Image (cartoon, rainbow, N blue to C red):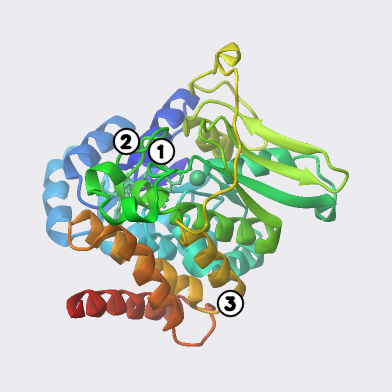
């Protein structure tokens, strides 16, 4: 037994291994997509029982490279799911995109405690993920910093009815304060330059469109069983207050700290224990002023779009997620303009087929249709 890290070569995956090393945790399995060099290094350093990679050809090469280690090398999405299902103390899912959903379900179905960074699992398949977790009586611990903050502020709350609302803080992303006209010409380089956090490329662009914060509203709905109208968003440029929980008596509990993902990662791994953590400490005297302001919903329509998707239910969020993932990539490839990301996601959501997000098949079909919608629309424009 030990810790399995899905997406160990990514931003969250690498920080998770750093935390695990500091905690002295054993590693059960690791997975990656394209970064074979780093995966090989990690396999040698952490000596997991198994690793998985996306492509069979890459798996073959890695099998040769790791022949002296006894590490089993699995291939494809099935290999990643097998790693997720191996008996472990915890599976931390740091995959990016809907590709993380089958692994989330595999971990839960195996009865593994799940530390979830892959928010797209909940955006696309929240109903199915929460149903599976509750049937298996398997805990889902949030890794996303806002949800970790809420979870921390929730400790000791005996009755969830005493919570009035959740306030997710948002840095505002790289384009905060820009006008719609300025966003029309936003470049990939600008969008990838986040003021406070160093993250993978997809989530950094999602922060720039505010789709990330919209996804976090959906994530909160599923993680905490709250309706979206009780999840507010406040722009807080300093990223010091990681989110707040308001109780019915007016008390507001928040978690504050440096913008350092190692703390929420560690909290998910060690919960309910708190242990010393390598995360940065803030010099509070330095923070003379913390500011809070409402988001600009007119310039960043992604927030309202996500609220509509989660209210609508069914496959709307799966379609929104699939279209956003595709459009986000097309923008990074220089094939569409920045505002088109949200426009295409909205269009795909409106054309989503009716149906329930109650099986992996229906969710992935809605995801595929939304991707097709984006490609067809871009081909036409
Ligand atoms: P990265 O892009 O840095 O890492 C993604 C990881 O997933 C890599 O290990 C990558 O492998 C692997 N991967 C990519 N595509 C696939 C695929 N199709 N199948 C299997 N594996 C794949 O992302 P982040 O670490 O930034 O984000 C991971 C998740 O955590 C996302 O859902 C994000 O929204 C969430 N999150 C991230 C935060 C952050 O600070 N980074 C904060 C809060 C949430 P390879 O490197 O080999 O290509
Ligand atoms: Mg977040």
Query: Closer to us: mark 3 or mark 1?
Result: 3
Percent x, y of residue 6: 38, 49
On-image quarter of the C terminus: bottom left
Say what secondary structure mark 3 lies in: helix
291 shown above or below 311:
above
Alpha carbon distance from label 3 to label 1 = 40 Å
- The outermost residue toward the bottom is 354
Residue at label 1?
Answer: 27
Can you name the residue that lies furthest to the right here?
A: 249
Judge from the rendering whether residue 273 lies leftward or rightward of residue 246; answer left or right: left
Q: Is mark 1 within 8 Å of ligand 1?
A: no
Q: Which residue is mark 3?
A: 312
Whichever of labels 2 and 1 marks the residue nearer the N terminus, that label is 1
Please name whichever residue, 365 or 91, is drawn nearer the observer in this view of the structure. 365
Q: Residues within 10 Å of mark 3 (few under 14, many from 20)?
A: few
Ligand 1 is within 8 Å of the C-beta of the residue at disc 2: no
**Considering only order in the chain, which callout, 2 or 3, is on the residue closer to the N terminus?**
2
The 10 Å Cα crowd at callout 2, few under 14, some 14 to 19, many 20 or more, is some
Image mark for residue 171: none
Which structural element holds mark 2?
Answer: loop
x and y percent of residue 77 in the render? 30, 64
User: Is 87 displayed left or right of 95 in the figure?
Assistant: right
Circles 3 and 1: CB distance less than 8 Å?
no
Spatial separation of the CA atoms under disc 3 and disc 2? 46 Å
The residue sitting at 58% across, 77% down in the picture is: 312
Q: Secondary structure at mark 1?
A: strand
Is residue 264 rendered to the left or right of residue 4? right
Q: Which residue is mark 2?
A: 47
Q: Are marks 2 and 1 in contact (CB under 8 Å)?
A: yes
**The one of 120 and 185 positioned closer to us in this rendering:** 185
Which one is earlier in the sequence, the residue at label 3 or at label 1? 1
Residue 228 point in image, percent of width and height: 65, 62
């Amino acid at each position: 037994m030990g810790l399995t890290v899905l997406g160990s070569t990514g931003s969250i995956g690498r920080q998770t291994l750093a935390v695990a090393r500091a905690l002295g945790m054993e590693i059960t399995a690791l997975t990656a997509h394209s970064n074979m060099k780093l995966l090989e290094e990690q396999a040698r350093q952490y000596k997991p029982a198994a690793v998985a990679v996306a492509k069979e050809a890459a798996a073959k090469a890695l099998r040769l490279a790791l022949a002296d280690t006894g590490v089993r090398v699995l291939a494809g999405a099935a290999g990643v799911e097998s790693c997720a299902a191996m008996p472990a103390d915890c599976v931390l899912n740091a995959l990016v995109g809907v590709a993380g959903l089958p692994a989330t379900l595999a971990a839960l179905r195996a009865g593994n405690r799940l530390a979830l960074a892959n928010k797209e699992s909940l955006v696309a398949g929240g109903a199915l993920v929460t149903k599976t977790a509750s049937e298996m009586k398997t805990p889902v611990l949030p890794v996303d910093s806002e949800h970790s903050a809420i979870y921390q502020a929730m400790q000791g709350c005996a009755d969830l009815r005493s919570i009035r609302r959740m306030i997710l803080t948002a840095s505002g992303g790289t384009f905060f304060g820009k006008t719609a006209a300025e966003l029309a010409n936003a470049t990939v380089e600008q969008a990838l330059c986040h003021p406070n956090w160093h993250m993978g490329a997809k989530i950094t662009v999602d922060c720039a469109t505010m789709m990330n914060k919209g996804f976090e509203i959906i994530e909160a709905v599923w993680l905490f069983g709250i309706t979206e109208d009780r999840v507010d968003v406040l722009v807080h440029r300093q990223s010091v207050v990681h989110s707040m929980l308001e109780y019915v008596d007016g008390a507001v509990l928040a978690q504050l700290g440096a913008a350092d993902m190692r703390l929420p990662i560690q909290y998910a791994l060690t919960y309910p224990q708190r242990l010393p953590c390598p995360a940065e400490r803030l010099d509070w005297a330095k923070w003379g002023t913390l500011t809070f302001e409402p988001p600009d919903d007119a310039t960043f329509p992604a927030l309202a779009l996500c609220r509509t998707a989660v209210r609508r239910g069914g496959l709307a969020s799966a379609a929104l997620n699939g279209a956003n993932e595709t459009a986000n990539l097309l923008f990074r490839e220089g094939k569409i303009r920045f505002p088109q990301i949200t426009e295409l996601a909205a269009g795909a959501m409106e054309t989503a087929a009716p149906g329930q997000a109650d099986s992996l098949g229906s969710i992935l079909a809605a995801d595929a249709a939304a991707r097709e919608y984006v490609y067809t629309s871009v081909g036409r424009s």
